[in-house]
Amino acid sequence: MDLQVLALYDRDMREGARPDGPGARVERVGAVVRQVADAEGWNAVLWSALDEKTADGAIAEQVEFFGTLGHEFEWKLYGHDLPCDLGARLAAAGFRPEPAETLMVAETAGLRVDAGLPDGVRTTQVTDAAGVDLLVDVHEKAFGTDGARLRHRLLAQLAEWPDTVVAVVALAGDEPVSAARMELRPGTRFAGLWGGGTVAGWRGRGLYRALVAHRARVAEDRGYRYLHVDASAMSRPILERLGFHALGTTTPYVHAG
């Protein structure tokens, strides 16, 4: 079953990818599918069908293309991608590997989630700029990274493609303490869970589980059969207990462009 789901994932979310936001486009060039966005968006190679003879040439073509645009870009490499040494070839071409994550998938109807919020905590859906500010505040505190690109992307999605994103913030009183979002691609079977994070003083209280449960219910209501996550080492055990299955690994290889 896992191999069948992985094949569906590759077909829906990679080879048949849709743009992830306004202003982005997905192109198929030979044996490569890539997303092209502005400098603030996500520029990436999403899928490839390469072998030992074609890999180096395809890598060089993508480096040249995104270099002409002046954009940093990511080659999103999955553990089952070919050739088997594609990661080493990317590194030799100047790509920098970031930490690997685990691709995990669950059926929305089969999740073992019965998670409530701690006393005094409520959730609110992000629908405007004020809500985006709350979510980005959590993101920056939880992950220690700049949230400017995330803010740019969410504001554009909410304004132009509101049906493609569900974002939620957990508030303790008026303080944002946890947040997450879900990316939706109409016409696919998969909804993606992204950015689940909790500020340091509120971890270990079930907020991550609660926000997974919230998004799973929304995904099922909207007709999505599966949830997918690129899980860190910290979140993988939680997701496994909820009923997610590991399908493989994914590693971002980043090129400065």
Image (cartoon, helix red, strand yellow):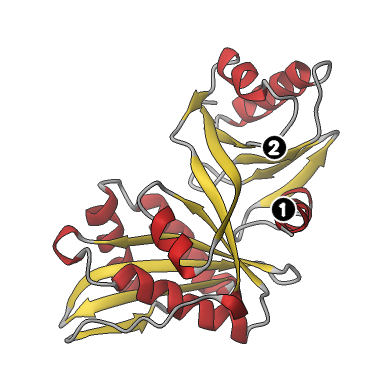
Along the viewing direction, whichever of 104 and 160 lies nearer the viewer: 104
Residue 211 in the figure: left or right of residue 55: left
Disc assigned to residue 80: 2
Q: Position of residue 140 (x, y in %)?
A: 26, 54
Q: Residue at x 60, y 18 (%)?
A: 88
Amino acid at dot 1:
Leu
Verify CB contact (< 8 Å) between mark 1 and mark 2. yes
Residue at label 1? 6
Q: Secondary structure at mark 1?
A: helix
Residue 20 in the figure: left or right of residue 149: right
Along the viewing direction, whichever of 171 and 73 lies nearer the viewer: 171
* Quadrant location, the C terminus: top right
Amino acid at dot 2:
His
Q: Residues within 10 Å of mark 1 (few under 14, many from 20)?
A: some
Q: Residue at x 75, y 25 (%)?
A: 83
Spatial separation of the CA atoms under disc 1 and disc 2: 10 Å
